[in-house]
Image (tube, coloured by chain):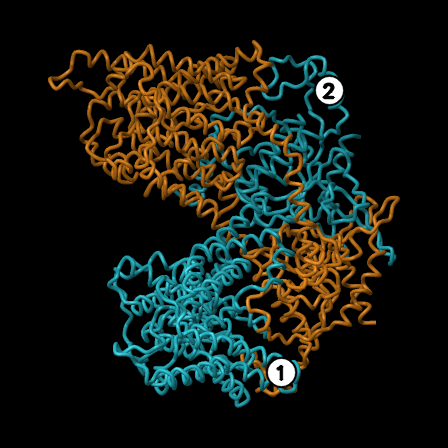
Chain colours: A orange, B cyan
């Protein structure tokens, strides 16, 4: 059997009419996607290592900036790293491991010069929660082991997302969700650190935030000596910061000096507190070997935990339910800040490459014993402000961390943990959204304020995990509701004249019921009676197809003439749910009916429809069927401004546009199979074909371009598809004139 | 403290600029929603009982139609009901209970005259699976108990959805998913009934379909005497059907007669088979009390299981994971067919009321021992074709079922189960999608063919449950991908002249790169150099905001002049990721740069944007910042065809439209808090305000309506918002002329 006869057989089995109108083909689309595969692959592979594009041009000017920024970030990341490790309920040295790996590895894969990777507050809190959950069911696992395994797995996942180039999934976390989540987390973290700051112990600081706050208040009488270090440290940090800000404004010439003093406040306060702790504690060790305030004690020097991360099945199973939230936080913070700094400093990051960078960083980091690290808001801002020039600054920061890790651990012994709590509280307080920002959500989109609020409240009253899930789900729900409930409007004409120039007037189509956008005095003139102009306000897809159908059919039934005279129809012959007026009222009803215009054409403005699907085409066919049944004669359907060849293809498949076979296609997505079809819609073959051809002849010459050439703007095979709304309405109205003559 | 001073304080805390431009207020919106609450409540309550609107007009003409249709459906529902109960692994009488309750209760709540509620194939299979799952973990529960509890709970859920008026959620199940799921289920059901048809036993017929098919083929040698009844019955059903169809065509005058003969084939075949079984079996009972073929045996007469459904916590817990799929199937089938018949017969159903109807039916049904019942495709088609006039036909059908339940159960003793299998196979075979329907998915939207295919394959190879979840999730994913990846295009002008009339020419804006919709020879003229016209092709929301941002910024960087001359910038002063050309090439580069036009204005066509959110407004602000940084001078942003006052509000909040403070608002949804802001974008206050005011004066008089009145079409406070694209482009170009003069 030859190919063509096989094709013929296939067509007979399918029983589909031969399409005479050429449409876009799916094969072309697929071929175009796999165009030039080798050169694409090459570009892809090179893009994996952005360092190759700038390292050859490295110069002294860049180096100066990088060294200053690298040292500055180093001075901050050492105290912060240790603090965040404590927040993550890990020994302090793990924060240094994460810091070192984060800043070093990132510079090879970075597409952003500003972002600094390392331990961050929210991720640390999440790690603390995950350790708590896992140990609750499997107490045999140690905290560091769980944290490293988490870094390895989430690193792999993020690396995979980056390599597959599906980083756009991150876009599904909108700004209010991020902001609400960050605010809620900051409140949670700060609340959880207050007990440490005050030396209050005796309850779970990782419980829901409101419980922690209540317990802290209850525990205030139990405040210990630690508070002297903690509160002093916190006050010191804020005093230095605001003093520097004040001096900056007063002496703008020395702004840079004050900026660097301000930056070093973390290190400075910690050194002072440590000295004080050393002076006070060194001779006050009690018999149990305890010191009067809580200090870090032995921090081992160097990397003590370099090994393959321990990924046994049991640990993986215990971690599995925590992976989504850990991955989301890993992605979220990093992408948000890398984009943000790209914008501020006028360059463009590649989100997928950034995901690869944090993926690789965490995967490699887990071998060094690091816990999950991602982009840090505060340190990135610092790096940017310190005048960083290239991602190479990370290497300098890594050197600082190494020095601290090998040379300063002896001094770290005396660091008071209350001081570290002060550093954490000071850092996260900046993450809380300001009132003006919250108000701007209200100004831009009131509903989003509620999403923001939900994120904050759920985070505070339940958990970070639920907070982020709630806000993402609420945003997605709002998105789907918006798609499922499109506004649509029937349009009328307004003639606009430019009073300034001598240019001719033009027609603008506006909704008949003005929705507050245009001027109130404006008179919108409806199109000729018998012509309806309807504009969609969304893509025409399955969630909204039946709303659009109802809108059109209801409007027609309310405002246009019913084709059949119901005066002489007996009650028993009428439908049960629309028995119509009583005997006396029937004549009146028919009189009212005859006052309404006879429907001739429906013009659909497809300029807002960027996609259409089977369900929607079926709804459109149903709309036509129902409207024609009401009007009791065929109706022309005109389409204006079709945006894509695929929409054209779908409409033609639904029997629209050509004017031929318009009434024949009735079931594109049949629910009730054909042989049950009980439709009673009359068929208007000859008449319809005629009017179609008629129109075809007329239209194929009428629309033409200006300039020197005259060419038809749309294909003459589809006379019911028009280039713009004005053209479509004109065609519909001219058809009306032809009919009434 | 008075209210106004509280307000002032609030404003100071928030630190937001006083808005001078009036915008739509959220309070007005809320007030409008809760407008006229009592009359709304009244309408709502009356709408709950649609029977009130038609029962008073009931007449003899309607009665005739209803009696005929009611009797016809009754003749079909009795054999089908018993068959489907067997399919649900319940005793046959449960099918009759469900049938009775379904047809009776529905008529009080129905908004569709055609739909017939009762046991259906897919729901029965689902019930069988659910019974299997529940008994697997909790073997103490009996099948009928589980089925009735399921009816009660899903009934409550669906009733709740209906009462809350959130039936639009059903729209999220698109046509290809429904079709694929129905096809897959039909294949599953038919495959599961073949062993019963042939009398093959010895394996689980509720396993995955492919396993059932393999085991059936393996078991063919074990075929028993039952096959004589089963195959004869199946053949008989098809012969009667096709004979009637043939005769219908040959003698169209007697079509109605043949139609009724065809309809009665189920009852007729079953009676013949039962007689044959009685004749053959009555003297062949073996010593164990067994008959040579499988027959129904005792079917108890009347309602034996009227009681409150047994809803203990343990059973509820066991049912919980099965509820989503059971609810979806309950909704899905019913809404799909009630809509479908509404369309075919030209009336409109109320989906929420239909949900209430099946909710009440199932809740009450569970007290009669009924298992979940929903709208039946085949019986509804039958009812419609038999000439039903009102939902009251259900009462007649209920009488038929009662007669069968009290008078015929003795005869039911001898019904061969192979005959019931034949009836099931015969019924579900019609649910399989025809090749032409599958091809039409391809023609309309190729991707949806794959969703259909996935639904079929997953249903056959895994389970009905997974099939429906897969297809819904795949459709939702496709929807989100479409929203996240909008096309957008830069537009140019085409002047269209109507050759037929004497009407003046008009301007149409079309994409500069034609995407196959318009004619190939068409020349699209770009707007004046320095003016960009960009059209979105979706709502501008968080999933797509950064794609749109990239599209605009990339285009500007590629095609428009960079404001800063890079010739004399040292390498060390250049950004690391864009070091520019080598020393020799710099001059050449600047020459190329100077050939490009200077950007003056960006015109955004908002006619496709029906929603905007905070993330998108932030992206728009970023776009402006980045473009102004590239161009090194302020750029005018014009907006055409804003669809809703909420979009206008959001844009004004983002600093657009007024021309004042345009460069001031920079962070609507700040990721990095303000005090980290390192932006280096120069501010153009005075200049910008001036050009804004200038334009304001000019525009406030220029746009005006035709007709007798002249009125500005858009508010003079927002001179950068335009009524249509032509107006926006003209304003942008006139601004350009002003600048260059």
Residue A405 falls left or right of residue B500:
left
Q: Residue B483, percent across and down? A: 57, 46
Give the chain letter at badge 1: B
Residue at the disc numbered 2: B590
SS class, disc 1: helix
Asked whether disc 2 touches disc 1, contact meaning CB atoms under 8 Å apart, the reply is no
Q: How many marks?
A: 2
Q: Which mark is residue B247?
A: 1
Frontmost residue, A82 versus A669: A669
Asked whether, in this view, residue B403 is left or right of residue A439, the answer is left
Residue displayed at 55% across by 13% down: A62
Looking at the image, the residue that sits furthest to the left is: A287
Q: In the picture, residue B126 is in which quadrant?
A: bottom left
Is residue A495 at least partly visible in the picture?
yes
Residue A322 against residue A595 in the figure, above or below? above
The residue at 74%/71% (across/down) is A685
Residue drawn at x 73%, y 62% is: A527
Q: Chain of mark 2?
A: B
- Mark 2 and mark 1, same subunit? yes
């Amino acid at each position: 059997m030859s190919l063509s006869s096989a094709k013929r057989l296939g067509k007979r089995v399918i029983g589909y009419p031969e399409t005479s109108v050429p449409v876009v083909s799916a094969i072309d689309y697929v071929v175009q996607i796999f165009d030039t595969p080798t050169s694409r692959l090459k570009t892809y592979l090179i893009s994996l290592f952005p360092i190759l594009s700038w390292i050859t041009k490295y110069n002294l000017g860049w180096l100066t900036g990088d060294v200053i920024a690298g040292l500055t970030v180093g001075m901050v990341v050492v105290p912060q790293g240790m603090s965040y490790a404590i927040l993550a309920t890990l020994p302090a040295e793990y924060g240094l491991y994460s810091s070192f790996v984060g800043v070093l590895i990132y510079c090879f894969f970075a597409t952003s010069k500003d972002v600094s990777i390392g331990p961050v507050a929210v991720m640390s809190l999440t790690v603390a929660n995950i350790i708590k959950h896992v140990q609750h069911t499997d107490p045999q696992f140690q905290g560091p082991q769980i944290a490293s395994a988490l870094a390895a797995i989430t690193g792999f996942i993020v690396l995979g997302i980056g390599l597959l180039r599906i980083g756009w999934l991150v876009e599904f976390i909108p700004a209010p969700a991020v902001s609400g989540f960050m605010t809620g987390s900051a409140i949670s973290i700060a609340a959880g650190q207050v007990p440490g700051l005050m030396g209050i112990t005796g309850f779970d600081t990782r419980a829901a935030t409101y419980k922690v706050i209540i317990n802290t208040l209850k525990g205030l009488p139990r405040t210990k000596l630690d508070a002297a270090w903690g509160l002093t440290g916190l006050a010191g940090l804020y005093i230095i910061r605001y003093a520097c800000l004040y001096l900056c404004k007063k002496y703008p010439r020395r702004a840079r000096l004050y900026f660097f003093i301000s930056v070093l406040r973390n290190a400075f306060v910690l050194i002072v507190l440590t000295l004080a702790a050393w002076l006070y504690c060194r001779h006050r060790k009690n018999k149990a070997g305890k010191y009067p305030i809580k200090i870090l004690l032995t921090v081992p020097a160097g990397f003590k935990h370099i090994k393959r991360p321990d990924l046994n099945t049991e640990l993986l199973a215990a971690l599995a339910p925590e992976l989504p939230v850990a991955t989301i936080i890993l992605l979220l913070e990093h992408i948000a800040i890398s984009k943000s700094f790209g914008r501020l400093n006028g360059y463009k990051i590649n989100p997928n490459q950034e995901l690869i960078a944090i993926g690789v960083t965490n995967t490699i980091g887990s071998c060094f014993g690091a816990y999950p690290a991602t982009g840090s808001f505060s340190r990135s801002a610092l790096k940017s402000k310190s005048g960083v020039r290239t991602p190479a600054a990370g290497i300098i920061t890594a050197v600082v961390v190494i020095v601290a890790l090998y040379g300063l651990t002896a001094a770290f012994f005396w660091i008071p943990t209350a001081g570290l709590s002060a550093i954490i509280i000071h850092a996260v307080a900046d993450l809380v959204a300001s009132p003006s920002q919250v108000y701007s959500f209200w100004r831009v989109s009131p509903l989003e304020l509620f999403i923001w609020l939900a994120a904050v409240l759920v985070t505070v009253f339940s958990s970070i995990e639920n907070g982020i899930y709630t806000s993402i789900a609420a945003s997605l729900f709002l998105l789907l509701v918006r798609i499922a409930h499109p506004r649509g409007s029937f349009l009328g004409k307004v003639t606009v004249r430019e009073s300034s120039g001598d240019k001719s007037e033009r027609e603008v189509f506006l909704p008949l019921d003005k929705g507050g956008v245009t001027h109130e005095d404006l008179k919108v003139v409806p199109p000729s009676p018998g012509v309806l102009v309807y504009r969609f306000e969304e893509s025409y897809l399955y969630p909204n197809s039946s709303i659009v159908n109802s809108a059109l059919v209801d409007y027609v039934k309310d405002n246009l003439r019913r084709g059949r005279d119901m005066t002489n129809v007996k009650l028993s012959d009428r439908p049960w749910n629309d028995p119509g007026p009583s005997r006396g009222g029937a004549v009146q009803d028919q009189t009212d009916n005859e006052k309404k215009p006879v429907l001739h054409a429906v013009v659909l403005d497809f300029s807002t429809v960027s996609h259409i699907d089977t369900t929607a085409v079926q709804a459109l066919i149903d709309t036509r069927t129902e409207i024609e049944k009401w009007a009791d004669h065929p109706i022309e359907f005109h389409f204006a401004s079709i945006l894509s060849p695929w929409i054209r293809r779908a409409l033609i498949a639904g029997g629209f546009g050509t004017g031929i076979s318009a009434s024949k296609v009735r079931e594109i997505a049949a629910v009730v199979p054909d042989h049950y079809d009980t439709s009673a819609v009359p068929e208007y073959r000859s008449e319809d074909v005629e009017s179609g051809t008629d129109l075809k002849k007329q239209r194929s010459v009428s629309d033409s371009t200006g300039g020197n050439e005259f060419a038809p703007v749309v294909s003459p095979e589809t006379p019911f598809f028009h280039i713009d709304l004005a053209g479509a309405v004109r065609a519909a109205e001219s058809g009306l004139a032809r009919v009434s003559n």
